[in-house]
Amino acid sequence: MDTGILYDKHGRQLHGLAAGDISRVIGRRGTVIRCLSGLIWVTQDGDPLDHVVPAGARYCSGSSGLIVVSALRDDTRIAVYRVDPLPEADWTYNVVRVDAGFTERVRREARQEMARWFAALLAGVARRLSRAWRRLLASRATVVPGAARGYHG
């Protein structure tokens, strides 16, 4: 769904997007599109590069031109606003910048995912060992030496 054209203003505009939704922003130097949650794909007229912006990062426009924002995940939230592009050297090209703490958050999430994966792996190994142990005990319980011949002793 196309949410129409948004105009960048000094005030912050918040928008919620679902996967596949598109927003267009009349951008100029100093326009910022911050990804608050989800994941967005940003392209701007005159820029040969497209930019993927994860949650906790922002796209900073260093030039004028229509900016197209596409949501790549459901429950994506963005903030669109304009800042004074100072110092000028920081605004000579379009760039994605990450917020303070972004890399630490990504590392923490990666460690948590690795711990979940390792726990699932260990649980699977434990299940297989338990089944193998039960099969071994069951096979030994059915084969009792001399029981088939009727010896009582």
Image (tube, grey):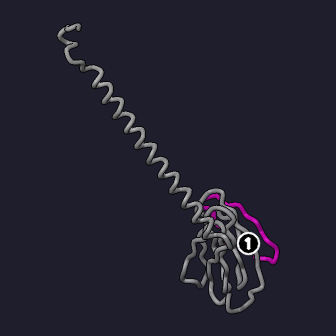
Q: Amino acid at mark 1?
A: Val
Is 108 rendered above or below residue 135?
below
Residue ID at (67%, 88%):
90
Q: Position of residue 153 (x, y in %)?
A: 23, 8
Circle 1: element type: strand
Question: Is 23 covered by the magenta stretch?
Answer: yes
Q: Quadrant of residue 45?
A: bottom right
Q: Position of residue 67 (x, y in %)?
A: 65, 76
Residue ID at (28%, 25%):
139
The front one of 106 and 89 is 106
Residue that mark 1 sits on: 80
Question: Is 118 on the left-hand or right-hand side of 81?
Answer: left
Question: Is 124 on the left-hand or right-hand side of 55?
Answer: left
Question: Is 104 on the left-hand or right-hand side of 132?
Answer: right
Q: Position of residue 5 (x, y in %)?
A: 71, 71
Residue ID at (54%, 80%):
49
The front one of 23 and 56 is 56
Is 52 rendered above or below residue 1?
below
Q: Position of residue 106 (x, y in %)?
A: 59, 65
Q: Residue furthest front?
A: 153
Q: Which residues are magenta?
A: 8-25
Residue ID at (71%, 77%):
32
Which corner quadrant holds the N terminus? bottom right
Q: Residues within 10 Å of mark 1 (few under 14, many from 20)?
A: many
